[in-house]
Image: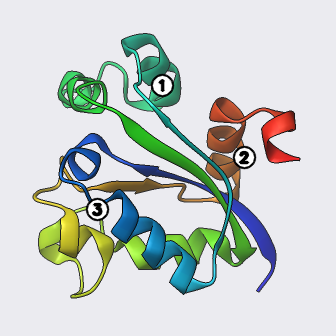
Amino acid sequence: MSFERTFAIIKPDAVKAGHVGEIISAIEQSGLEIRCLKRVRLSAGICKGFYHEHVGKGFYQELEDFMTEGPVVMMCLEGDGAILKWRDLMGPTNPANAAEGTLRKRFGTNIGRNATHGSDSPVSAAFEVGYFFNAFELS
């Protein structure tokens, strides 16, 4: 394994339901380090930039409406194999297909309201971390 950074979001559904602490605890217990963390409310414009590859797709407006309905918690996670480790901890996008104990199985309700987001590759991790965290925050 190699040392990596990845991006994580605790989505509005999990924040509203009060699961932030449980999710952060699971991250810490997994051996990942939380390099940066902030709680923010996303705007429509920020969503468009972040989800740029989905703008214009049939599900995009529902995604934007969901991600802007309440605060989110964003994190830069670090560790050996951080991208895969975080994705394994989250489980598949659809909570119905997720293994017991994964975050999406525990806290997600459906494919659209699935509690967490994580980068799927080194390229997306670099973009996503850089989109939300500046060099000072990452130092």
Q: Secondary structure at mark 2?
A: helix
Q: Which residue is mark 3?
A: 93
Residue drawn at x 57%, y 75% as measured from the top left: 84
Is 84 situated above or below 139? Answer: below
Hey, what amino acid is under mark 3?
A: Thr
Instruction: Write down the quadrant of residue 73 in the picture.
Output: top left
CA gap, disc 2 and disc 1: 15 Å
Which amino acid lies under the numbered mark 1 shown in the image of this protein?
Answer: His
User: Would residue 46 be found to the left or right of residue 18 on screen?
Assistant: right
Which residue does the image show at 81% across and 79% down from the upper left? 2
Spatial CA span between label 2 and label 3:
21 Å
Q: Position of residue 125 (x, y in %)?
A: 65, 51
Instruction: Specify the label residue 126 is tagged with.
Output: 2
Q: Can you give x and y, in whole percent of width and height, for residue 128 in the image?
A: 62, 41
Q: Please name whichever residue, 29 or 130, is drawn nearer the observer in this view of the structure.
A: 29
Categorize mark 2 by other alpha carbons within 10 Å: few (<14), some (14-19), many (20+).
some
Q: Quadrant of the N terminus?
A: bottom right
Decide: marks 3, 1 in contact (CB < 8 A)?
no
Q: How is the image coloured?
A: rainbow
* 25, 55: nearer the viewer: 25
- Image position, residue 79 (x, y; %): 73, 75
Task: Please report the residue visible at 20 percent of the width from the left and 74 percent of the height from the top.
Answer: 106
Q: CA distance from mark 3 to mark 1?
A: 19 Å
Residue labelled with disc 1? 52
Which of the 4 image quarters holds residue 44? top left
Dot 1 crowding, Cα within 10 Å, few <14, some 14–19, many 20+: few
Q: Which residue is depicted at the point 17% across and 76% down? A: 97
Nearest to the observer: residue 125 or residue 76? 76
| Residue type beneath disc 2 | Ala
Q: Earlier in the sequence, mark 2 or mark 3?
A: 3
- Picture coordinates of residue 134 (x, y %)? 78, 32
